[in-house]
């Protein structure tokens, strides 16, 4: 879909955009020249599906796409999200600490802010922390007289150095 969008087509033809499939836990494929090319890289609800033992590699690979001064934007599931609480009641759904398998077979890790510091900060991918916070929302379904409490983690990180164009 992305490659059919006129905005992407225009940006790609000018060399301002690139899209492809890549298992972020592995080194980038040689056909992608992605080292230090991005001003902004975005990880939205994808790292939670990665096994915790492979997350440090995934974080380093994502950071490697950034130019010096570039920003990594991150959002994913947060610790004690209502979905985690429901999964936690079933022992067969638990794969590890804060790591579960959903009914559709997808895996999901629930992060806290220390996880993000460890993965992306000085001891991990080597990025500067700009922002780390929890986002909490309560959704109400009046017709069913129910509420859902959702928790996400959000972070912005910067690759050390000066942004070059």
Image (cartoon, rainbow, N blue to C red):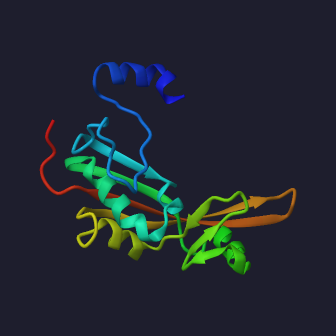
For the point 25% across and 56% down, the residue is 158
Left or right? Give the position of 78 relative to 14: right
Q: Is residue 81 above or below residue 130?
A: below
Left or right? Give the position of 138 relative to 10: right
Q: Quadrant of residue 58?
A: bottom left
Q: Position of residue 26 (x, y in %)?
A: 37, 54
Answer yes or no: is residue 136 visible. Answer: no
Viewer-side residue, 55 vs 123: 55
Viewer-side residue, 61 vs 115: 61
Q: Is residue 115 above or below residue 37?
A: below
Q: Quadrant of the C terminus?
A: top left
Q: Position of residue 28 (x, y in %)?
A: 32, 46
For the point 29% across and 20% down, the residue is 14
For the point 49% across and 29% down, the residue is 2
Total labels drawn: 0
Q: Quadrant of the N terminus?
A: top right
Left or right? Give the position of 94 relative to 159: right
Q: Position of residue 75 (x, y in %)?
A: 47, 57
Left or right? Give the position of 62 relative to 7: left
Q: Quadrant of residue 126?
A: bottom left
Residue lying farthest front? 30
Q: Position of residue 39 (x, y in %)?
A: 26, 42
Answer yes or no: is residue 92 visible. Answer: yes
């Amino acid at each position: 879909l992305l490659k059919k969008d006129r905005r992407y087509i225009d940006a790609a033809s000018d060399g301002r955009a690139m899209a492809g499939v890549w298992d972020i836990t592995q080194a980038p494929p040689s056909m992608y020249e992605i080292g230090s090319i991005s001003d902004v890289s975005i990880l939205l609800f994808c790292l939670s599906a990665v096994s915790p033992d492979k997350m440090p590699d995934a974080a380093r690979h994502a950071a490697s796409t950034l130019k010096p001064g570039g920003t990594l934007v991150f959002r994913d599931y947060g610790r004690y999200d209502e979905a985690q609480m429901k999964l936690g009641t079933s022992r067969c759904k638990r794969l590890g600490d804060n790591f579960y398998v959903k009914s559709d077979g997808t895996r999901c890790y629930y992060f806290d802010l220390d996880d993000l510091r460890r993965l992306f900060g000085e001891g991990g991918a080597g990025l500067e922390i700009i922002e780390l916070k929890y986002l909490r929302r309560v959704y109400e379904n009046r017709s069913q007289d129910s509420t859902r409490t959702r928790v996400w983690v959000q972070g912005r990180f910067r690759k050390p150095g000066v942004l070059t164009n």
